[in-house]
Image: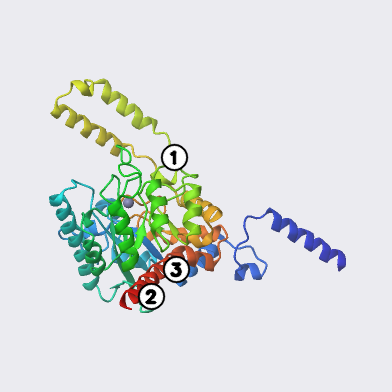
């Protein structure tokens, strides 16, 4: 008996030392049988169903203002390009979502600012309308508890956000206008600089060396009102300025790890550590270019080279010829697209962020309808594949709950608690 026990212990030790991170106990494991793939998937789907799932970034309001677009109808993503509607949220087990009213950066003058504000309000109103038109399926949410309450009722929570601070224009009072419309986070800046902040991707480089004076006021106003501050798209200097000024933790609603995939839009290790030290959270995004280095595409390169061989140098082209060249290049890019990133690559980023910032500082913001969508998580109906991969890698249900919503809700609560404190102080 003793020898047998010793042999078993050694065997167990060997198995333990050879195996990947320990998987959560399962009934199959308890009975000593190895978990099959089907059992793992079934266990993951149960976890996916039990935890509150939350996607912090979708640009779907852009779709909602398209004439005839109906959120209660299931769309085929390959035909329509649409990545989110309520039927697909149900299919994917996606319990809550932040719909961001996104206004692309344009001219920064009074006329441009008021056009941007009107467009943002149009998208917010369309989002509210779509939720009110589907009261059996979804509900509008404004506080962290709303998502939990709606999940209990078997409904999905629709939060409103704004991507790009451009619609604020130069009038601080607009921040409260958007808060009153239900906006609960604002992405300070998009792909090019605005009046608030520098973008990480403006080809002209920085304009304010971080946050502008007005941007600082906006950050403080967001603290006062209880709006989460989103630094996705912002330059590194804006990130550090915002961390220094904000009295509440901040978020990046759709950003990945720069050490895994080199891209200005991704966050350096130092940024990941800093946002964690300040209690914030980085929401991983399903955008191929931020998840893996672009693979070689020799067929596309050959097609471009062949097309260029028959063209004049661009400097000698007329405007019409230049337009035709752009169209040809677009057609070639569409004919030979880069392969999409994979769920494994996405979860590699989660693993990395967990190793640098900790399990309490990572979440998920897919960027559907804004370019997000990868192999296996192509639209809202497939988000359970993230959970399956997390389970495969040994994440526990508690950890998966933190990733899917717990961490973001913690920040959301702190942001709103700070605003309440400020309101109480102001009232005294
Ligand atoms: Zn974005």
- Within 10 Å of disc 3 (Cα), the crowding (few <14, some 14-19, many 20+) is some
SS at badge 2? helix
Mark 2, residue position: 145
CA separation in Å, label 2 and label 3: 11 Å
Quadrant hosting residue 396: bottom right
> How many marks do you count on the picture?
3
Please state if 347 lies on the left or on the right of 184 as rendered.
right
Question: Which residue is drawn at the image coordinates 44% and 43% (left, top)?
Answer: 292
Q: Tell me where residue 293 appears, x and y as whole percent.
A: 44, 40
Return the residue at label 1: 293
Residue 294 makes an appearance in the image: yes
Query: What secondary structure is found at the residue carrying circle 1?
Result: loop
Quadrant including the N terminus: bottom right
- Horizontal side of 300 relative to 40 (left or right) equals left
Q: Position of residue 232 (x, y in %)?
A: 37, 52
**Which circle, 3 or 1, is nearer the viewer?**
3
23 w.r.t. 156: above or below? above
Residue 316 picture quarter: top left
For the point 45% across and 41% down, the residue is: 262
Label pair 2/1, CB-CB below 8 angstroms? no
**Marks 3 and 1, the one that precedes in the sequence:** 1
Task: Point out the frontmost of discs 2 and 3.
Answer: 3
Kindly identify which residue carries mark 3: 410
């Amino acid at each position: 008996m003793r020898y047998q026990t010793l042999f078993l212990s050694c065997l167990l030790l060997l198995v333990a030392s050879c195996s990947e991170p320990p998987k959560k106990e399962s009934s199959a494991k308890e009975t000593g049988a190895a978990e099959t793939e089907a059992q793992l998937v079934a266990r993951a789907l149960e976890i996916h169903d039990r935890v509150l799932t939350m996607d912090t970034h979708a640009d779907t309001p852009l779709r909602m203002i398209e004439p005839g677009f109906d959120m209660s109808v299931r769309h085929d993503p390959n035909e329509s390009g649409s990545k989110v509607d309520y039927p697909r949220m149900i299919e994917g087990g996606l319990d809550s979502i932040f719909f961001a009213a996104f206004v692309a950066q344009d001219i920064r003058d009074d006329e441009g600012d008021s056009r941007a504000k009107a467009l943002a309000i149009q998208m917010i109103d369309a989002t509210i309308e779509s939720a009110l038109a589907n009261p059996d399926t979804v509900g509008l949410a404004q506080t962290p508890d709303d998502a939990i309450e709606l999940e209990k009722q078997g409904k999905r929570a629709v939060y409103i956000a704004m991507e790009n601070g451009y619609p604020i224009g130069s009038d601080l009072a607009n921040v409260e206008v958007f808060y009153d419309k239900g906006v609960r986070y604002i992405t300070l800046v998009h792909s090019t600089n605005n009046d608030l902040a520098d973008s990480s991707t403006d080809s002209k480089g920085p304009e304010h060396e971080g946050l502008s004076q007005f941007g600082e006021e906006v950050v403080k106003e967001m603290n006062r009102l209880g709006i989460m501050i989103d630094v996705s798209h912002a330059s590194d200097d804006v990130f550090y300025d915002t961390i220094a000024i904000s009295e509440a933790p901040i978020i990046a609603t759709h950003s990945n790890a720069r050490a895994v995939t080199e891209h200005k839009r991704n966050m350096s290790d130092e940024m990941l550590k800093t946002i964690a030290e300040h209690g914030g959270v980085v929401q991983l995004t399903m955008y191929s270019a931020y998840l893996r280095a672009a693979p070689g595409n020799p067929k596309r390169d050959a097609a471009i080279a062949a097309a260029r061989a028959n063209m004049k140098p661009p400097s000698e082209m007329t405007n019409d010829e230049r337009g035709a060249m752009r169209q040809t290049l677009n057609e070639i890019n569409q004919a030979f697209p880069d392969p999409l990133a994979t769920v494994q690559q996405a979860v590699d980023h989660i693993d990395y962020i967990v190793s640098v910032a900790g399990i309490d500082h990572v979440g998920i913001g897919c960027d559907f309808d804004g370019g997000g969508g990868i192999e296996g998580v192509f639209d809202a109906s497939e988000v359970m594949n993230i959970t399956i991969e997390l389970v495969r890698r040994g994440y526990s249900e508690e950890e998966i709950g933190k990733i899917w919503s717990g961490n973001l809700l913690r920040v959301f609560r702190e942001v709103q608690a700070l605003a309440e404190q400020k309101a109480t102080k102001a009232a005294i």
